Amino acid sequence: MKVIINKKEINLEIADTFWKKFKGLMFKKNIDYCLRLKTNSIHTFFMKEEIDVVMTNQNNQVLYYTRSVKKNQIIIKPHAYYVYEFPTNFLENLKINDFLKIKE
């Protein structure tokens, strides 16, 4: 699967097990894919790199995004359904209410 944002594509992995959700991108270096979690909050404890974060509703409509999230941060958005974690500096020209395109 891939995520497409403004003609930029990146591989998408889905954290669909307890261990994948628990580990997320902790301890990873050279992140080159996007991770999707079904949640409304994340933390960046034990992260080796900064990440870009997008939070969407069930239809992948962007509710919140932030670039270059540093380690040891907590982000909570009560109305979010999915969290997408991208390599830092991946997001360009993204706006609130845009839709993320998911390609099978």
Image (cartoon, grey):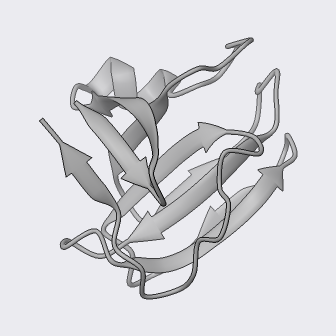
Left or right of residue 90: residue 25: left
Does the rendering let one see residue 76? yes
Give the mark count: 0
Measured as percent of width and height from the top left, residue 49 is found at: 82, 27
Taking the view exactly as shown, the residue that stands out farthest to the left is 104
Q: Residue at x 45, y 33 (%)?
A: 10
Q: Residue at x 35, y 19 (%)?
A: 19
Measured as percent of width and height from the top left, residue 30 is found at: 72, 13
Q: Residue at x 47, y 67 (%)?
A: 55
Instruction: Answer with the quarter of the image where residue 94 lies.
Output: bottom right
Instruction: Answer with the quarter of the image where residue 16 lies.
Output: top left
Measured as percent of width and height from the top left, residue 5 is found at: 46, 56
Does the rendering let one see residue 77? no
Query: Is residue 68 positioned above or below 46 on the image?
Result: below
Query: Is residue 78 positioned above or below 41 on the image?
Result: below
Left or right of residue 30: residue 60: left
Left or right of residue 11: residue 57: left
Q: Report the front residue among 15 and 11.
A: 11
Q: Residue at x 57, y 52 (%)?
A: 42
Query: Is residue 18 positioned above or below 45 on the image?
Result: above
Left or right of residue 40: residue 14: left
Quadrant showing the N terminus: top left
Q: Report the front residue among 36 and 1.
A: 1
Quadrant showing the C terminus: top left
Measured as percent of width and height from the top left, residue 44 is found at: 72, 41
